[in-house]
């Protein structure tokens, strides 16, 4: 399914940005890169250096003279823009983007990014189905490779939900009766040490101990360790 996604860079200005984009693409398993009218001789030395181990993505990249030809192989084009444009296109959030991916699983997607300095032109945006905005704080100037990395990650997460939902081996949480045994053990030892002073605050102190321990979700092994620690601290030094 990853072959159904391609990344289209329109008039990129810096070789190192393309190299960083290729590196992010390879990190998340993508390889299809189309470049339109780069502002330098592509690929240059900086492109290769910043791509690190992803120069194979660079070497397979296709270079085009215009946007129309670069988008032809895709069914749906999603353009990235830092600001909302006054054009008749649907502006979507990342959540909307994921919903579209889920509904159109058989479609191929081209993700289009504009020049670093100016972003996509209205003409380039006119070729897109949707305009995707990555939310940021007041400062909205995301680096080209950073924007692409976020999108790669979101697609990767969508395609690997089981990996993200799998939190590892699930350990059974101890029953409250076992937690109560630990608390009772602790309270008895604290009583012997005259911990509850002044006496009129004893119930309040016990309530605080309950709030602290009962909100934990330990497993049986962790409870045994806690009980051992409490018992060891209560023993007199020889």
Image (cartoon, rainbow, N blue to C red):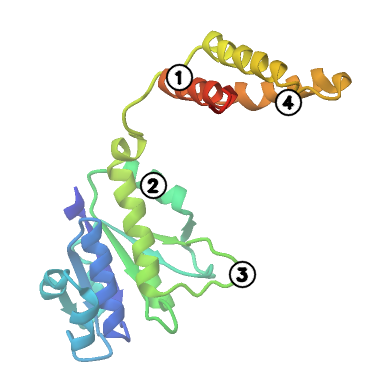
Which residue occupies 61% across, 16% down? 183
Quarter location, residue 106: top left
**Which callout, 3 or 1, points at the residue further toward the start of the chain?**
3
Residue found farthest to the top? 177
Vertical comparison of 122 with 137: above or below? below
- Lower position in the chain sequence, tag 2 or tag 1: 2
Along the horizontal axis of the image, is 95 left or right of 170? right
Determine contact: label 4, label 2, CB under 8 Å. Answer: no
Which residue is identified by label 1?
224
The front one of 219 and 47 is 219
* Number of on-image labels: 4
Tag of residue 98: 2
Rounded to the nearest whole Å, what is the CA distance between mark 4 and mark 3?
42 Å
Contact, CB < 8 Å: mark 4 with mark 3?
Answer: no
Find numbered disc 1 in the image and state the secondary structure of the residue it sits on.
Answer: helix
Residue under pointer 4: 208
Residue 237, percent from left and from top? 56, 28
Provide residue 189's location: percent of width, then percent of height. Answer: 64, 17
**Residue found at the far bottom of this picture:** 40
Q: CA distance from mark 3 to mark 1?
A: 50 Å
Could you tell me if residue 126 is visible in this image?
no
């Amino acid at each position: 399914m990853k072959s159904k996604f391609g990344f289209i860079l329109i008039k990129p200005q810096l070789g190192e940005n393309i190299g960083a984009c290729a590196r992010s693409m390879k990190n998340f398993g993508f390889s299809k890169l189309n470049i339109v009218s780069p502002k330098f001789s592509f690929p240059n030395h900086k492109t290769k250096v910043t791509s690190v181990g992803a120069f194979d993505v660079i070497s397979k990249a296709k270079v085009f003279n215009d946007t129309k030809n670069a988008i032809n192989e895709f069914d749906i084009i999603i353009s990235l823009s830092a600001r909302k444009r006054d054009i008749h296109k649907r502006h979507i959030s990342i959540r909307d983007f994921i919903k579209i991916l889920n509904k159109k699983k058989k479609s191929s997607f081209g993700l289009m990014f504009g020049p670093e300095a100016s972003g996509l032109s209205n003409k380039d945006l006119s070729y897109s189905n949707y305009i995707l905005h990555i939310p940021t704080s007041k400062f909205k100037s995301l680096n080209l490779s950073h924007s692409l990395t976020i999108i790669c990650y979101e697609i990767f997460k969508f395609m690997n939900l089981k990996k993200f939902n799998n939190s590892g081996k699930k350990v059974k949480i101890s029953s409250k009766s076992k937690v109560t045994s630990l608390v009772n053990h602790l309270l008895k030892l604290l009583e012997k040490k005259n911990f509850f002073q002044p006496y009129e605050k004893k119930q309040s102190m016990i309530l605080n101990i309950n709030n602290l321990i009962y909100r934990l979700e330990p497993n049986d092994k962790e409870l045994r360790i806690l009980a051992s620690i409490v018992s060891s601290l209560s023993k007199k030094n020889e």
